[in-house]
Amino acid sequence: MPVSEYDAIVVGASFGGLAVARQLRGRVLLLDRNEVGAVQTSACGTPLWVPQALGVADSVLQVHDRLTVRTPERSVIYDLSAVPFCTFDYRAFCQGLLAQCQVRFLRTAVTGMADGVVRTGEGRFAAPVIVDCSGWRGAVINDGDPTQPRARTYSFGLETKAELSDEGLSFWLDRELIRRGLGWVFPVGRGSLIGLGSYVGVSKLKPPLERFLAAQGVAPTTYHGTYFPNRLLRATVGTVFAVGDAAGQCLPLTAEGIRPAIYFGGECGKLVQRVLDGALPLPQALAHYHGLVERYRWAYRVLGLAQWITVHAPTRWFAAFAALATRPPFLPRWWPRYGWFGRVEPVAVSTPT
Ligand SMILES: Cc1cc2nc3c(=O)[nH]c(=O)nc-3n(C[C@H](O)[C@H](O)[C@H](O)COP(=O)(O)OP(=O)(O)OC[C@H]3O[C@@H](n4cnc5c(N)ncnc54)[C@H](O)[C@@H]3O)c2cc1C
């Protein structure tokens, strides 16, 4: 079978893949097994500045300036107004980013890669630059042999939409509900996304989630869920760039994976474009990207430690710590620092005519 040649191939057209692709010009192929924005896995909670900076603010469903952390002992309210959060519509967000891309999108499943040739259901494609943004499975970097989700590396989340109008974002830490994980209620305009996440990758979450829903007095609709990493993995594998969950960039503890995928994806895309322009050799671009991601390893370690404490400490200790973190001088110090992570100056991206 003949091989079609491109300048660059991006696998996965969700947060990471679209963040890479919108930086690229040239003969670029963007592959995904689903239509863009069709299959949502995330609760789509992120700082409000993210969709605003990306020019997709019209995808925002609800803005949140407070977060409640609930434990059986007490509830703690965080004032997020210094960096408000939002929940957004996944399809509108992704379609908005796709409209900013000057690439060829092809819907097909990638089955692996060898010697710079990507195998798909629609044939074989080659490019000097390949970026794997296919989520936790890493379809390219694992050559179609999916990662086995190991308990100490992958969390699992399951959620459903329900008719619940809560006061704002909330997390629930209750060992009766889920032993090594937490629950969440993310209002999305009409109704809320309600879910449970296991930090140790337990995937049978439907029965406890149904109990959680029953306690809120609401019924489930459709469920969606998947694994996501809670440990920083490899940013480059051979000559392939990895972005987002494929590189383990989802943040431990808070399970925020959208922002890191978009931030590292954007930076990766800029480096790849310099390679395509002939301004930077590929090995140097790989080294730059690897170095950029490694600069954040300490932050991932800190959040990983906080996740470990959350899992293992008695919930009353966690509640006391969570309460302390809402108070001055602590909150004004750590919240903006955390909330602005990943912000880069907006880059002018021209839309195709
Ligand atoms: C239930 C749940 C709720 C979450 N809530 C939040 C939240 O509120 N906020 C937050 O920041 N993070 C949240 N996360 C984490 C976040 O969803 C992920 O970290 C984020 O989606 C990672 O983005 P990504 O682009 O790397 O991968 P993904 O979003 O997983 O995208 C991977 C893309 O690759 C495609 N793909 C996969 N395999 C192949 C293949 N073989 N061939 C072709 N295409 C392929 C997929 O179709 C998909 O489009 C949540 C996770 C879960 C499970």
Image: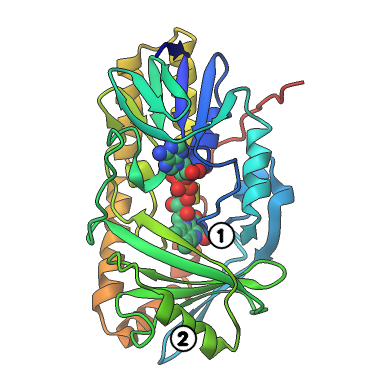
Which residue is nearer to you in this view: 244 or 325? 244
Q: Quadrant of residue 197?
A: bottom left
Residue sitting farthest toward the bottom: 73
x and y, in percent, of residue 77 in the image: 53, 79
x and y, in percent, of residue 215 in the image: 52, 90
- Marks 1 and 2, Cα distance to the nearest angstrom? 23 Å
Callout 1 secondary element: strand
Badge 1 density bin: few <14, some 14–19, many ≥20, Cα 10 Å: many
Disc 2 marks which residue? 211
Amino acid, disc 2:
Arg
Q: Is residue 193 above or below residue 219?
A: above
Q: Is residue 159 visible?
A: yes
Which residue is nearer to you in this view: 182 or 195? 195
Q: Quadrant of residue 317?
A: bottom left
Mark 1 CB within 8 Å of ligand 1: yes
Mark closest to the chain's N terminus, 1 or 2 = 1
Disc 1 marks which residue? 45
Color style of the picture: rainbow
Q: Quadrant of residue 325?
A: bottom left
Q: Quadrant of the N terminus?
A: top left
Callout 2 secondary element: helix
x and y, in percent, of residue 190 in the image: 72, 70
**Measuring 58% from the left and 66% from the top, which residue is drawn there?**
80
